[in-house]
Image (cartoon, rainbow, N blue to C red):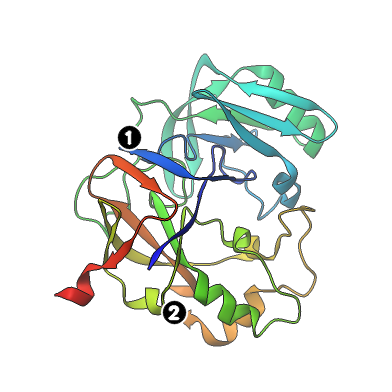
Amino acid sequence: MRVHSLYIYPVKSLAGIPVSSFNMDDFGPSHDRRWMIVDAERRFVTQRDYPMLARVHTALDGDCVRVSIPGEGDYLLQPGDEEARVLVWRDWVKAVYGKAEASEALSRFCGVDFRFVYMPDTSFRRVDAGRVTEERRVSFADGFPFLVTNLASLEELNGRLETPVEMRRFRPNIVIEGAAAWAEDDWQQLLIGEQMFNLVKPCSRCVMTTVDPDTGVKGSDLQPLRTLGKYRRTIDGVIFGMNAIHEAHGTVRAGDPVINRNADQ
């Protein structure tokens, strides 16, 4: 097995960036989901309700994030001075509002009053304590620092679909090739290059998988979620991919060898 591809998502629920490598810090992949969008009630906003967000592209400009908003142009996201408590799922998290220009442009594009918020280093949001006993932190990602997926599982799913979908629908950080389809169900610990990852929870999937990442439109046929639901439904939900935490800082690169450590025990 080896790493097929890597992705980071500088802003939660905006378009991701394919990368050849990424460094890891306490939060997970560096720059991953440190920014998020909130509504007037300071609640997180995603493609579940606003699928057009898929059309807002992101890029790294040094250590800064740049967003490209259709019809509005490019904006550098910059933290301001105003702090706020913002809600992501069940967690109220300390954040900092971004400067107004980018937020105003996004609000015009979506037709709703939205603001960008940033998670500073001083903010601590804990990984799900029901799955991870250590006090580990996570960014604005749904619940865990990493999502690992298996290319063969996508190929098996596409064999059941009338119109194949890309892995981008599932918004992974690490895509692995060379494994059998659905082998990830049994992975517990992976050595990726020189970095160890613990796979702690199957990833339950939602309506976001039905959003075309190019057009920002939800498919009326609810694919691929409808098909997945016919044979990938578990007590954790409709499953595709595995959530993971890392054991140390380091670097992961496309092409890195991947070893299933629990298979060796």
Task: Name the residue located 64 percent from the left edge and 60 percent from the top edge.
Answer: 208
Foreground: 222 or 39?
222
Residue 101 image offset from top left, x and y in percent: 71, 18
Residue 134 image offset from top left, x and y in percent: 19, 50
Relative height, residue 121 to residue 132 (above, below): above
Residue occupying the far right of the picture: 71
Name the quadrant containing residue 128: bottom left
Report whether residue 113 is seen: no
Mark 2 → mark 1, Cα distance in angstroms: 33 Å
- Which mark sits nearer the N-terminus, 2 or 1? 1
Name the quadrant containing residue 211: bottom right
Report whether residue 198 is seen: yes
- 158 to the left or right of 192: right
Residue 51 image offset from top left, x and y in percent: 73, 52
Relative height, residue 228 to residue 11 (above, below): below
Q: Which residue is mark 1?
A: 124
Near mark 1 (Cα within 10 A), the count class, few <14, some 14-19 or many ≥20, is: some
- 109 to the left or right of 7: right
Name the quadrant containing residue 156: bottom right
Residue occupying the far top of the picture: 81
Q: Which residue is mark 2?
A: 182
